[in-house]
Every structure is written in C-alpha cells, then in structure tokens.
C-alpha cells in the first residue's frame, strides 16, 4: 500500500500516525510533508528509523518549491509527478493520510 | 490504468487542487485515463465560474475546464456539498457537472485507483 | 479485489467533529456507499475517535448534532466500526464512552486491516 502524507510532522500528527499503524510499504511525502525529508529537521531521527521498514519517497517539485531541494535526507527517493503516478500503480492501493 | 481523483479543498486556499491537477496531467501524459475527478467538501469551489485570480497567477478553474475538454475527464461536483456552499448550475464553470455522492462511490468501484487530495 | 464487483471500501476518520465539517460530510459518503452494496468499514483513529463520544450537546453552538447518525448505521447494514486502541487511550477514553458498539483494534491489527482494502477514503 502507498501511504501519501501531505503535512509537516513538526505541526501535525499524520506522518506519526501512519508510522504507528501502517503495515510496512511505500510512503510518499508531498506538499508540506516534504519538510520531513530534509536533513536537520526535528523529525529526521524518526524518519530514518522508519526507513528500515518503509521505502520513503518525496515529491521533488514540492521540495524545490519550498527551497529545500538540496537538503534531502540520504536514502529518500525523489520522484516527480510521473513518479507519483507510477507509485500508485506499483502499489495495489493507496491511502492519503489527510 | 483508469484513475479516479477526489479533491476535497477549494482552490488557492490549499495546495490540494494544484496537486490533483498535476497528478492528473502526469497520468494522462503517461497514457493513462483519468476517468473522473470528484469535487467534495470545499473542493466544490473549484467549479465556480466567477473565479478571477490575478493575471500573473494560474487559473485553477479554467485549468480543470481545459483538462476536461482535451482529455474527456468527467468533472463531478457533489450536489449536497455544492448547495451548502452556493455552487449552482448558474455559476458552474464549463466542463463541470453537478451530481450525487453516488458518483464518488462509482469512481471507487470502476477505477483501478482512487487518489484523494485534501487537507 | 473481492468477488462480484464488490470492493472493500474503508473510511478512515481522523478528525474531530464540529471544528471542521469533514466528519459530517464523511458520514454522508458512508451512507451512500452502503446503498451501493459495497463492503464498508469505518475506522476511527486519532481525533476521529471523538466523533463517537457519548453525550454531544450542540445547542450552544447552534449546530446540528449528527452523532445519532452513527447509531443508525446498523440500519444501513454498516456494522464494521473499528476504533484504534492507542488513539482511545491517548485521549483518556474507553469503549464505555462511545455511543455505538465498536471493535477495538491494536495498531498492528488496524494496519493489517487497512492493507486488505481496495479503496481507502480518508477524511
């Protein structure tokens, strides 16, 4: 299953809830959730820990828009909107953690 | 692949409608079908033809209309959510139609994937 | 996908009622989905568990109290209501605080159930 998160983990619990409940699979960070994938953010440790169980992707255009295109945590895979589409296909289902 | 998309937030206020549009465009570019986009909650505001952004900004409503025209995307606005928010046939932009929530369920049953964009 | 054109629909409710309209409008989708003879599950987790709190009194905020609708779900053959145990505990609530009968699941069981679904709608 593809888990789509769109909120910063520093101000909202969606990513944390997803990590607590979800069966390991793919996570795509979009919109304000891209902050989770930047080095030095307070959630970095938790994301790195989750990367042992989940494959984490980030929507690069959302990261670039926020001026953090060069701060991506190593091991997080960058995708464009086409890559987003591919992820919804390679997974049998998807869930947006709104 | 046949995609259904749900948009739950209004234009400009939240990135949801932009993200949904870029997803739809990318899916079509890859040769997939975007069968229906269902607008729910404040998402119904994406269908107002009275929308007039500043000239140097993207026109979110017209962008959806164009996508519908060029790629036969069915843009459906939830009637109950629309009535609550003053979206009627009179102010409905081209390419959109107002219908019931059953259209959302149908998108879930008929599409290979249903992707939600919201807050 | 399940047999006979029936899909497994899960509605994940993670937002509290009244502060925003999501809970109410989500319930409207749930009722319609049941009418389409689909396999419907409702999940309440995070602040979504507050939707099921007994004793909601909305007169003072001049808003319709829609919580009785959860009790009517059974009449629409919607009987799969799941609440995440950790979310309840984190809010100082127990099953006795809820206005309908639910199945309480631990986080792992909840995750496994999500993974089995065809369509997951989150509000």
Image (spheres, coloured by chain):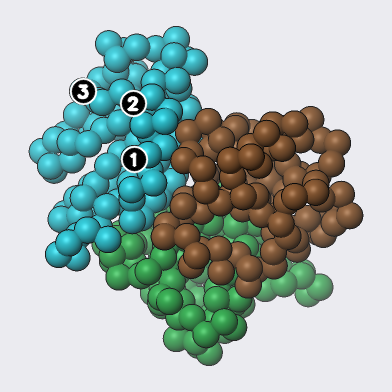
Chain colours: A brown, B green, C cyan
Name the secondary structure under disc 3: loop
The quadrant in which residue C16 appears is: top left
Splitting the image into 4 quarters, where does residue C2 fall?
bottom left
Q: Which chain carries label 3?
A: C
The residue depicted at 85 percent of the width and 56 percent of the height is: A69
Q: Nearer the viewer, residue A5 or A72?
A: A72
Q: Which mark is residue C113?
A: 1
* Mark carried by residue C105: 2
Q: What element carries label 2?
A: strand
Q: Residue furthest bottom?
A: B70
Local secondary structure at mark 1: helix
* Residue hosting label 3: C101
Name which residue lies at 47% across and 27% down. Answer: C47
Against C100, is A10 above or below? below
Query: Can the viewer see residue C30 in this picture?
Result: yes
Q: Compared with residue B38, is residue C111 higher up or lower down, i.e. above or below?
A: above
Residue B65 is situated, as x and y percent measured from the top left of the image, at 54, 80
The chain ID associated with circle 2 is: C
Label 3 CA crowd tier, 10 Å (few <14, some 14–19, many 20+): some
Marks 3 and 2 sit apart, C-alpha to C-alpha, by: 13 Å
State the separation of the CA atoms marked 1 and 2: 10 Å
Residue C45 is left or right of residue C81, and the answer is right
Count neighbours of disc 2 (C-alpha within 10 A) and say few if under 14, some if 14 to 19, many if 20 or more. some
Q: Do the residues labelled 1 and 2 touch (CB within 8 Å)?
A: yes
Residue C72: x %, y % from top left: 16, 34
């Amino acid at each position: 299953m593809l888990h789509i998160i769109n909120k910063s983990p520093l101000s909202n619990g969606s990513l944390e809830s997803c990590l607590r409940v979800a069966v390991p699979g793919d996570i795509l960070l979009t919109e304000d959730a891209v902050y989770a994938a930047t080095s030095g953010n307070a959630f970095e440790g938790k994301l790195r820990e989750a990367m042992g169980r989940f494959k984490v992707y980030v929507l690069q255009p959302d990261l670039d828009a926020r001026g953090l295109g060069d701060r991506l945590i190593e091991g997080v895979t960058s995708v464009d909107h086409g890559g987003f589409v591919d992820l919804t296909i390679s997974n049998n289902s998807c869930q947006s953690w709104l | 692949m046949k995609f259904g998309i749900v948009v739950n937030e209004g234009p400009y206020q939240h990135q949801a409608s932009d993200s949904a549009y870029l997803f739809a465009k990318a899916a079509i570019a890859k040769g997939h079908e975007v069968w229906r986009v269902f607008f729910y909650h404040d998402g119904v505001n994406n269908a107002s033809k009275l929308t007039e952004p500043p000239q140097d900004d993207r026109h979110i409503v017209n962008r959806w209309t164009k996508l519908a025209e060029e790629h036969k995307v069915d843009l459906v606005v939830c009637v109950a959510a629309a009535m609550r928010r003053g979206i009627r046939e009179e102010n409905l932009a081209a390419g959109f139609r107002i219908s019931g929530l059953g259209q959302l369920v149908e998108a879930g049953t008929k599409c290979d994937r249903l992707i939600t964009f919201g807050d | 996908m399940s047999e006979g054109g029936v899909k497994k629909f899960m509605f994940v409710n993670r937002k509290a009622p009244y502060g925003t309209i999501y809970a109410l409008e989500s319930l409207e989708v749930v009722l319609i989905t049941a009418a389409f003879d689909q396999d419907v599950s409702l999940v309440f987790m995070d602040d979504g568990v507050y939707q099921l709190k007994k004793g909601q009194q909305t007169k003072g905020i001049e808003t319709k109290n829609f919580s009785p609708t959860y009790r009517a779900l059974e009449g629409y053959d919607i009987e799969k209501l799941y609440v995440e145990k950790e979310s309840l505990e984190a809010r100082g609530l127990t099953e006795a605080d809820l206005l309908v009968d639910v199945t309480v699941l631990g986080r792992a069981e909840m995750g496994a159930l999500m993974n089995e679904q065809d369509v997951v709608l989150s509000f």
